[in-house]
Amino acid sequence: ASPLSTGSILFGKALACFLAMIVVEALLVAVGVLGFGVRPTSWPLLAAAVLAAATAFTGIMMVLAVVAETEQSASGAAWATLLVLAMLGGGMVPLFVMPRWMLTASGVSPAKWAILALEGALWRGFSPAEMALPLGLLLAIGAAGVVLGTRLFRTY
């Protein structure tokens, strides 16, 4: 009943998701800086990591939102997908304690690359060249999700 196009609806959902992730990440950084004395080694690289991570997970959200038929199924699919990605990517078990096979499998998880990018800018002191791989992969995942989500949305 709305005069909005399907593209506008999808863009609005993506923008809301993207902005919500940036706000949450900014609040977490603020808590780290103000509450725990964390001093990022590079603020520009931290901003790039935050934007790239938000882009990747917005792309994932686009695909999950489009393939789900109801809000409840989208919520369940999102929890299941993100739980597996977090487990594989080092969000629950640090990568350095994973067995070699699981460490290899973690490469498919955007959570791994988001954590690596954030750590690289916060305390690992990554150079821009070292940040290129995780940032590039996160942006590619986001772009692929946006393209796939948009195409799937048009077919439904």
Image: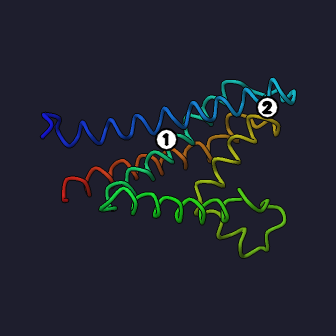
Asked if residue 63 is positioned above or below residue 53 in the image, the reply reads: below
- Residue 49, x across and y down, in percent: 62, 37
Of the residues shown, which amino acid type is indicated by label 1?
Thr
The residue at 40%/34% (across/down) is 15
The residue at 40%/52% (across/down) is 145
SS at circle 2: helix
- Residue 154, x across and y down, in percent: 19, 53
Q: In the image, 56: left or right of 107?
A: left
Q: In the image, 35: left or right of 151?
A: right
Is residue 111 or residue 108 the one in the foreground? 111
Looking at the figure, which quarter contains the N terminus?
Answer: top left
Circle on res. 66: none
User: Mark 2 highlights which residue?
Assistant: 32
Of the residues shown, which amino acid type is indicated by label 2?
Gly
The residue at 45%/57% (across/down) is 75
Q: In the image, 139: left or right of 110?
A: left
User: Mark 1 highlights which residue?
Assistant: 55
Is residue 136 or residue 119 the one in the foreground? 119
